Structures are given as structure tokens and as C-alpha cells.
Image (spheres, rainbow, N blue to C red):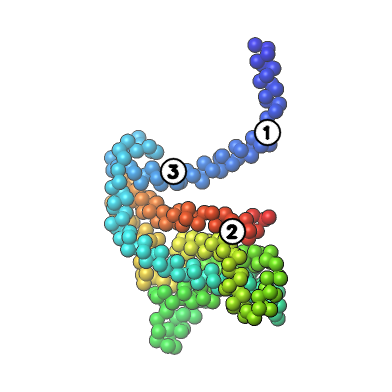
Amino acid sequence: MKDRLLKFQKRLKKINYNHLFIYVVLFSLSFIFLLPIIRMVSMTFMSESDLISPEVMWVPTEFTFKNIQVAITVMDYFKSLVSSVLFIGLLSVIQTIITGLTGFVFVRYHFKFKNAFYALIIVTVVVPIQLFLITRQLTFVQFTDLTSNRMIGTMNPQLLFALLGQGVNSSIIILIFINFFRKVPFDLFEAAAIDGASALQTFWHVTLKISFSTVMVAFVFSFVWHWNDTIITSTFLGDSVQLLNSQLGLFDSLFGSRGGSNNNINEAYKMAATLLTMLPILALYFITQKQFVQGIESSGITGQ
């Protein structure tokens, strides 16, 4: 008995309590973040009887796909999915190219007011995007009044934002490219110039090839940010493109007025719809996982 007690005391002395504390904190935070996801998945596959019953909280007693079927029907899921992927994919491609070109110019060339422009990029990272919405909206309204060409309620504003480097979180992506291009040997740029390549040719044929992983990081970030954005979309796009996120509001108008225990059924429909909306983002990450991890490491986002 004494031998066992001594062995136990030795094991306690070997325990690194700092590491133990970190593990407990990380586990607790992981549980807090995962709890809503677990709840969402649980409600997605609950039957109506489980949703109404106060005794069923987490584990369904009856497994069903009805909530997913309702969500697919209400959202017109496959049509919304195709239009969302095409529109947001186009925005992300444009934003990635423009921000990459901007980062390349900042690293490769010296020009007047370069530091001022760089400071402006830093400021736009800090300032909330909501502060720019009113001025942008007024600008498009005035443009419509002058030219009779409607802008708000079309794809044009967001396409214009992407082309002008004003897309969702464009400043952050520019900083990612700047941080990566600073690590590229300057001799590569000089060699391309000696061979007669223009600045655009150098960017397209040399810079993009060696920064493919970083480009994928920028594209994934851009796609996810545009996918999750609702403020700019609701302000400028309206109903001109049938996006998945905009379809989530249909459930309250169709099922939200029932009241009582039926609210849980409406919530289950919305949980199923949210899960379906998340699937394309998860698929994108798994497809680009290797390049994404390499890009995170090479771009210096991890601080290395």
C-alpha cells in the first residue's frame, strides 16, 4: 500500500500543472465553441415529437431527414447553391487578383505617398465597414439620379467594389500579399525585368506562380467572407441574385407565426438550413486544405 502511495506521489510531482491548466482552458473553450454546432446538428435530425417533447434535449429518439427536406424545398437549395457559388466565386477571383496586384506594387515599386497609402490600408482594417455603407449608398443613389441607370439592387456595386480593391476585408488580403512578397528574393523581379518582362507580365508569370499557396489562402478567405456577409449584400444586392444566406429569413415568415412549442419546429428547419449553408464552405476547405495550410505558413500569418 505504501509503495502504491509513493508511486502515486511521484506521478503527481511529474505533472506539469502549467500544461494541465492550458489543456483545461483549451478544452473548455473548445466545448463552448462546439456546443452551438452540436445543438444545430442535433436539432437538424430531430423528429417533431422530439422537438415538442421537453424531455428530449440533445440526442434524438427518432432520427429523421424531414427538416433537411423542408429546408431544401423552402430555400430552393440547389438553385440558390449554384447562383451563390458562381456569384461569390466571381467576386473572390476578382478580389484575389486585384489585392494580389496591389500587394505586388507596394513591395516592388517606390512611389509618392506610398507610406500614406499603406497607412490608409491599416486604417481600413481597423474601421468597421458599416461606416462606409451610407456614403457608398448615397453615391450610387446620386449616380442613378444622374444617369437613370439603377445600381442598388444589382450585382454592379459589389463587382465594382471588388475591381477597385474595396471588397469585403480587402485590406487584410492586401497585407497578406505584402507580407509574402517581402519574402520573395528581389533578384527574381530584376531577372524578369532584364528578360524584357513588363510589370504585369512579372506579376502574372513569375509572382503568381511562386505564390500559389498564398493565392489560395486569399481566395478562401475572400470566399468565406463574402459567403458570410449579409450587411453589404442586403444593402446593395437585394434580391437580384438568389443567395443561400438570404434564403434563411424565409423560415420565420413561413413558420415563425405558429407560436408555442411549434417554434422549436421552426428552429429545427432553420438549423437544417444553416447546416446546408455551411456545407459548401466546409467542402472548399477540404478541397484546398493542403494549399491553405502551406499558404498560411508561407505568408507569415502564423508569425513565423
Q: Is residue 248 visible?
A: yes
- Answer with mark 3 or mark 2, whichever residue precedes in sequence: 3
Q: Amino acid at mark 2?
A: Gly
In this rendering, position of residue 288 left or right of residue 51: right
Return the residue nearer the eye: 21 or 142.
Answer: 21
Q: Which mark is residue 38?
A: 3
Q: How far from the left and from the top, in percent, is residue 171?
A: 59, 68
Q: Measure how far apart labels 3 and 2 are at the Cα level.
A: 30 Å
Tag in front: 2 or 1: 2
Observer-nearest residue: 254 or 61?
61
What amino acid is at disc 1?
Tyr
Residues marked 2 and 1 touching at CB (< 8 Å): no
> For residue 51, which quarter of the picture?
top left
Neighbours of disc 2 within 10 Å: few (<14), some (14-19), many (20+): many
In this figure, which residue is indicated by the disc labeled 2? Answer: 295
In the foreground, 1 or 127: 1
Which of marks 1 and 2 precedes in the sequence?
1
Residue at 68 percent across and 55 percent down: it is: 304
Element at badge 3? helix
Q: Which disc is residue 17 wearing?
A: 1
CA gap, disc 2 to disc 1?
Answer: 35 Å
Residue 175 percent coordinates (x, y): 63, 66
Q: Residue at horizontal 70%, vertical 81%?
A: 112
Rendering coords of residue 80 (x, y %): 35, 63
Tell me the quarter of the picture where residue 256 sits. Answer: bottom left
What x and y, as percent, mark residue 222?
A: 51, 64
Determine contact: label 3, label 1, CB under 8 Å: no
Assess disc 1: are there few (<14), some (14-19) or many (≥20) residues with their C-alpha within 10 Å of its C-alpha: few
